[in-house]
Image (cartoon, grey):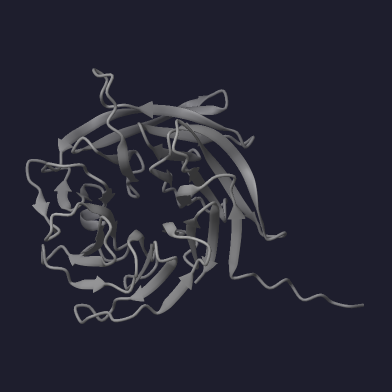
């Protein structure tokens, strides 16, 4: 009798979507391994969000759900629920913040739409948002109207097949004098109250003050912001159309502690390792995803330790799996790829 060895797991899995992809993120729930949500980038009103999951037996991605979304999603995020105790929720930003629920039957239904400009027909699109890992009932959004809004979510009882989810504005603040392109909660001080928008630091307990952590010398808007997942003193940012990523230490504001500048075209995404304080991944229009070891900071970081090239396209999104830290996901053109690191 011949004994077949178990199939060796591949290092790269690829999913080709029907449209160009932009936003994407990993599901966090432990019972939903290799599940991701991707958002289309079509320059018109009608866009889509798709939930895909790797079938580990066939090594192919399976589409679990597809639903309509007005305008492209600027960000997608699953509820940061690493224990699987909350309803299976997904949030998207675009014209508004929407929270969606995945039903046991595979259907996705909108649980609530959160709109902070009730008195106006004008809608200020949301550039990004972040879901608080310590208090999953807090979501912060950033907008082109110079504001950041902190929302409180309430998840009620099941009605039919959907939990009743509602939200209220906990606080809205004018964070900048120009558009705000990103927002992220920090793990500092318990992980609930500190957050940054690009790049000022706020504390929900003392919103009358904010600390400027960094301003681009040429006053170019800062596009992305990412906190180190293990050491809340460090965060990274990238300016619009810039080829270098700047790492900052909040204890020494306004002075970069490192610059990662091997990209040959503009950087589109930054992701810190979920499980290590010294590893960060960057991706950009030069088709490259680079992983860096930054433990030598503040000495110069010359070269990445790993480089992956997406031969067919500019990488416009990168996410490192919070509960699957061996995997990084990237998007380029119509493709999603997950790469084993």
Q: How many marks?
A: 0
Q: Position of residue 315 (x, y in %)?
A: 44, 60
Query: Which residue is located at x 15 percent, y 51 percent?
Result: 200
Residue 294 location (% of width, % of height): 29, 76
For the residue pair 303 and 54, the one nearer the viewer reads as 303
Q: Residue at x 20, y 82 (%)?
A: 299
Q: Quadrant of residue 155?
A: top left
Relative vertical location of residue 107 with respect to residue 203 in this rendering, above or below: above
Identity of the residue drawn at 10% across and 67% down: 252
Image quarter where the N terminus lies is: bottom right
Q: Eyeballing the image, is 194 above or below 12? A: above
Judged left or right of residue 271, residue 223 is left
Q: Nearer the viewer, residue 264 or 279?
A: 264
In this view, the residue in front, 303 or 110, is 303
| Residue found at x 36% / y 77% | 304
Q: Position of residue 36 (x, y in %)?
A: 53, 50
């Amino acid at each position: 009798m011949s004994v077949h060895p178990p199939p060796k797991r591949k290092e790269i899995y690829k999913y080709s979507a029907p449209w160009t992809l932009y936003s994407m993120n990993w599901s966090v729930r432990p019972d939903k391994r290799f599940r991701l949500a991707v958002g289309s980038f079509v320059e018109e009103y009608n866009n889509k969000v798709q939930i895909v999951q790797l079938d580990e037996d066939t090594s192919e991605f399976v589409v679990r759900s597809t639903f309509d979304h007005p305008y492209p999603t600027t960000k997608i995020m699953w509820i940061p629920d690493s224990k699987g105790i909350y309803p299976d929720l997904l949030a998207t930003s675009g014209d508004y913040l929407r929270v969606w629920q995945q039903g046991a039957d595979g259907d996705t239904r909108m649980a609530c739409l959160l709109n902070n400009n009730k008195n106006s027909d004008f809608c200020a699109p949301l550039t990004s948002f972040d879901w608080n890992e310590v208090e999953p009932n807090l979501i912060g959004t950033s907008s082109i109207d110079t504001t950041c809004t902190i929302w409180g979510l309430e998840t009620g009882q099941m009605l039919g097949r959907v939990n009743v989810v509602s939200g209220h504005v906990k606080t809205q603040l004018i964070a900048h004098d120009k558009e705000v392109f990103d927002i992220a909660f920090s793990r500092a001080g318990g992980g609930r109250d500190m957050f940054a928008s690009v790049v000022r630091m706020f504390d929900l307990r003392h919103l009358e003050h904010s600390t400027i952590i960094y301003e681009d010398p040429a006053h170019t808007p800062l596009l992305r912001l990412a906190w180190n997942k293990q050491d809340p003193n460090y965060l990274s940012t990238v300016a619009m159309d810039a080829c270098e990523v700047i790492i900052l230490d909040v204890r020494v504001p306004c002075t970069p502690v490192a610059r990662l500048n091997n990209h040959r075209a503009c950087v589109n995404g930054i992701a810190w390792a979920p499980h290590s304080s010294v590893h960060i991944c960057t991706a950009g229009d030069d088709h490259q995803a680079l992983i860096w070891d930054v433990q030598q900071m503040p000495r110069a970081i010359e070269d990445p330790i790993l480089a992956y090239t997406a031969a067919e396209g500019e990488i416009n999104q990168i996410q490192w799996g919070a509960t699957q830290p061996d995997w990084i996901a990237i998007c380029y053109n119509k493709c999603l790829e997950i790469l084993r690191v």
